[in-house]
Image (cartoon, rainbow, N blue to C red):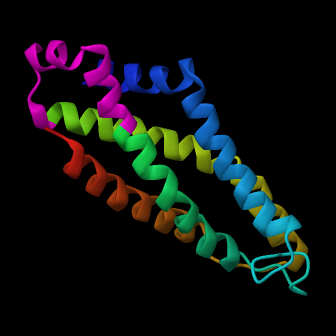
Amino acid sequence: MIAIIKREIASFFSSAVGYLVIGVFLVVNGLFLWVFDGPFNILYAGFADLASFFQLAPWILVFLIPAVSMRSFSEEKRSGTLELLLTKPISTSGLVLAKYLGILVLLIISLLPTYPQQSFARLKSMLHTAFYRLYIHVFIRFSYAQCACIREYSF
């Protein structure tokens, strides 16, 4: 199962898909939080509040999660390696779990670069919020959405 997770991560970063997903997530978040004038802009709000990031991130992930999850299985079918994977001594649920964990690692990698952005916002206002809990909340929302996508698309 660990080999499938490693292969899944390697397939994301061997093509432009992994970099594109992370880049789109970071650019859209950055534009809405720092550039565009609106309710999510941290600089024009008068105080730095992390709530705008945690309101915006799930909406961006709603569009990225299905694309990444469905690509995982469709790439296996397209390349013809799905039949090979099904003959391995791993159950179907183990295969789905390995795909799920591989995509979950991609989420963690995409959330890591947002930490300095949030640290800057926190330093600006000296707010002591529990933004670690909010990161976990975004992570859990992503997990639920990913489970739904994989459940609908798997075998």
- 37 or 48, which lies in front? 37
Q: Give the magenta-colored segment's residue range.
A: 71-93
Q: Is residue 96 left or right of residue 29?
A: left
Quarter of the figure with residue 124: bottom right
Which residue appears at 9% of the width and 14% of the height?
87
Q: Is residue 139 left or right of residue 151?
A: right
Up the image or down, 13 lies above or below 52; here it is: above
Up the image or down, 76 lies above or below 57; here it is: above
- 146 or 89, which lies in front? 146
Q: Give percent across and percent down for residue 50.
A: 71, 75
**The N terminus - image quarter:** top left
Which residue appears at 75% of the width and 63% of the height?
118
Q: Give percent across and percent down for residue 16.
A: 60, 26
**The C terminus - image quarter:** top left
Name the main secondary structure of what is drawn in magenta: helix
Q: Give percent across and percent down for residue 99.
A: 30, 34
Quarter of the figure with residue 31: bottom right
Residue 79 located within the stretch drawn in magenta: yes
Q: Give percent across and percent down for residue 148.
A: 27, 57
Up the image or down, 82 lies above or below 36; here it is: above
- 119 or 106, which lies in front? 106
Which residue appears at 35% of the width and 25% of the height?
75
